[in-house]
Amino acid sequence: MNVFEKLIRLWWVILSFISFFNGLGFIYIGSKHSNRNWTIEGIAYETPWFFYLIYSIIFGFDIFKFNQTDYVLIIALLLQLICIVRSFWVAIKLWDVYDNNDKYAHNPVELINPFKSKENNGPSIHSVCCLCIAVIFFIFAIIAIP
């Protein structure tokens, strides 16, 4: 995979710079890679912005008074900075994953098990091995008893 294709796959990092949408990038990449932790992390980054909108509707915007809306805005901005750093960190890890996907890509092959027969003619090799190990442990138990 060339550099341009990798950059196209990492478009979601741009969302971390946009207020109110910074967690959507993690929600997207979490759902794309089936990573529940990234999805939860994206929801955690979006939650303060949701509360900020709700508090601004309830308490209103007053630039001369410090109220609950300002506290939530400070938390949301701090989480946005954390989201920016974290998105670059995840993007660097995914860059390596995209490299290794090409390197280790393989076609599934059906493996032939030489110990498995088409018909069951008696005890399998696995049951014989288990029986031998049980006998060895039994012998050691008899020797260990004073």
Image: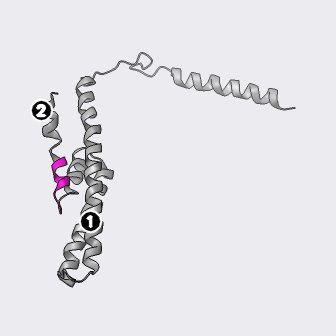
Residue drawn where x is 27% and y is 38% of the image = 92
Nearer the observer, 84 or 96: 84
Instruction: Inspect this view and state whether residue 43 appears.
Output: no
The image quadrant that residue 81 belongs to is: bottom left
Q: Quadrant of residue 50?
A: bottom left
Query: Which tag is nearer the camera, tag 1 or tag 2?
Result: 1
In space, the residues marked 1 and 2 are separated at their CA atoms by 32 Å
Q: Position of residue 30 (x, y in %)?
A: 25, 49
Q: Quadrant of the N terminus?
A: top left
| Up-down relation of residue 71 to residue 124 (above or below) | below
Secondary structure, mark 1, is helix
Looking at the rendering, the stretch of residues picked out in magenta corresponds to: 13-19
Q: Please name whichever residue, 47 or 60, is drawn nearer the observer in this view of the structure.
A: 60
Name which residue lies at 64% across and 25% down: 133
Residue 109 belongs to the span the image colors magenta: no
Residue 115 on image: x %, y %: 45, 18
Q: Are marks 1 and 2 in contact (CB under 8 Å)?
A: no
Quadrant that contains the C terminus = top right
Q: Amino acid at mark 2?
A: Phe
In the rendered structure, the answer to whether residue 129 lies left or right of residue 54 reads right
Q: Position of residue 73 (x, y in %)?
A: 25, 70
Crowd around label 1: few <14 · some 14–19 · many ≥20 (10 Å): many
The residue beneath circle 1 is 76
Q: Spot the residue most to the front.
A: 64
Q: Which residue is mark 2?
A: 4
